[in-house]
Image (cartoon, rainbow, N blue to C red):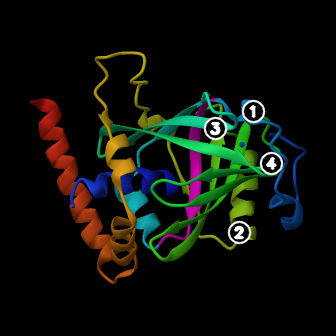
Amino acid sequence: MMEYVHVAVAVFSLLSLGQSAPATNCESLIQPIQINGRDQLLGRWTFIAESTDIPGSRVLSKMFMGNSWLSSTAATQENVITTSQNQKMFGLCFSLTYNMTLENNALVLVIPYPSTAFLLNTGCPDCMVVFTNYTIGRSLYKGLQLLSRRPKVSAAELEEYKKQVECLNLPAAAILDPENGFCPDPALSKDTKSIDLTSSFNSMGSDDMNLLDKILKSGNGVKLLTEMLSMISRNATAMMEN
């Protein structure tokens, strides 16, 4: 899942959004919608589901699936959005802050890997369906996220999203379970135990991305990455307990 990729990319470095009428067919389901300014993208959003064609993404999400939410605020620069993502993985809370720029009806991310995201048509009144093209190393990938103001959407809203996944020829989506609980907002309390990965996220370069891409595409890459992330989880748990 792409939100897990965001966090996994940062963890790995330690080792070396509008509404519209319901859609019924593929043409309308994958139709990009107009983003009328950044205000509609601001506030708190919960990750509901995601599909991505990154190799081994479903294996990773099944093993480390937690819950994730983000809070977006307007930066001082025009059309720049500062996003703070809060991710539960390995039973721990991780935070990550990054900037995206609204350009030509798309959300553009530069660091640590280039990506361009568009909002797609959705009948969910308080959701965003985000289609993203992004590059890891020398490979191009795509993904589709469903985010909502609510922690859970209706069955019909989820089915519409699943149909969008099919229309885009993406793998079956991983669905998050809100019953697993969410990480608290670290900005609201200094006592919140959250591991901030922002510095690691920002320090990653092209060599790191190329290495990660090779690992993901190799035969035993997902297994190796899983073992590495499990080791980091144990070390992080020990640090937070001390």
Q: Position of residue 220 (x, y in %)?
A: 29, 79
Q: CA distance from mark 4 to mark 1?
A: 15 Å
Question: Between disc 4 and disc 1, whose residue precedes?
Answer: 1
From the image, tell me which residue sits under label 3. 80
Q: Position of residue 166 (x, y in %)?
A: 71, 68
How many labels sit on residues? 4
From the image, tell me which residue sits under label 2. 166
Asked if one can make out residue 188 in the rendered structure from this viewpoint, the answer is yes
Q: Nearer the viewer, mark 4 or mark 3?
A: 3
Does the magenta stretch mainly form a helix, a strand or a loop? strand
In the picture shown, does residue 143 fall above or below 86?
below
Question: Between disc 2 and disc 1, whose residue precedes?
Answer: 1
Q: Which residues are magenta?
A: 43-54
Q: Left or right of 132: which side holds 188?
A: left
Q: Position of residue 42 (x, y in %)?
A: 66, 30
SS at circle 4? loop
Q: Which numbered tag is attached to residue 40?
A: 1
Q: Left or right of 161: which side holds 198?
A: left
Which quadrant would residue 190 be assigned to in this image? Answer: top left
* Callout 1 amino acid: Gln
Question: Mark 2: few, some, or many residues within 10 Å (few <14, many ≥20)?
Answer: some
Residue at far front of view: 77
